Amino acid sequence: MLASPHHFADAGDIPNNPVLPLILYRQALADVATDRAAAFERLFAAHGWGGTWRNGIYPFHHYHSTAHEVLGIASGSATVQLGGDGGETVELKAGDAVLIPAGVGHKRLAASPDLLVVGAYPHGQKWDLIRADDVVDGAAVRARIAAVPVPQGDPILGSGGPVVSLWAA
């Protein structure tokens, strides 16, 4: 498995995160042959992440100012734009995962018909949903993003994962 950090500058309507990089995990669950969705749920829960859901990725630019989010691609594939309009476009496929720090924009551009995503949040964090075109108090949003605590464990690799090394305070 390859885990790579991605930094995004403030894009105005998408604040992104000024400190924490997004972490892309290629083939986090590559060897799972059966129910990859359940395997992602178990993996996230084992590392202190909860509030899991199964669905897709919204087809509009949005971010969360009160929680970090992990997305595990259980089946199918998706083309996702990260960091807002000027950000990076990535292809995600079954087995991949992406850890999105509070404030970082994300949007589905395309998806296979069988796309299934499992999402989760660090225990105790409650997510909100802010669209790029929402009218918000930018200073208040950025203050909320800065106040979101770093989780104790990486959702994929636990205490030895990139959250510990790349997000350490």
Image: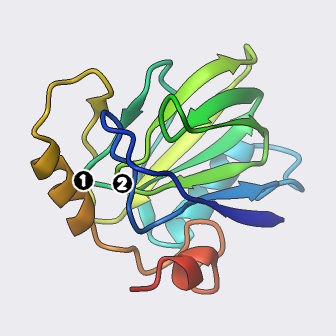
Looking at the rendering, in which quadrant would you find the C terminus? bottom left
- Horizontal side, residue 167 vs residue 169: left or right: right
Task: Tell which of 111 and 76 is nearer to you.
Answer: 111
Query: What label does residue 135 carry, if any?
Result: none
- Horizontal side, residue 55 vs residue 28: left or right: left
- For image coordinates 67% across by 17% down, the residue present is 110
Q: Which residue is mark 2?
A: 102
- Horizontal side, residue 53 vs residue 30: left or right: left
Q: Quadrant of residue 122?
A: bottom left
Task: Tell which of 77 and 86 is nearer to you.
Answer: 86
Asked if residue 37 shows in the view, the reply is yes
Q: Are marks 1 and 2 in contact (CB under 8 Å)?
A: yes
Asked if residue 56 shows in the view, the reply is no
**Residue 67 in the image, given as x and y percentages of width and height:** 31, 55
Residue type, numbered disc 1: Thr
- For image coordinates 31% across by 33% down, the residue present is 13
**Secondary structure of the residue carrying numbered label 1:** loop
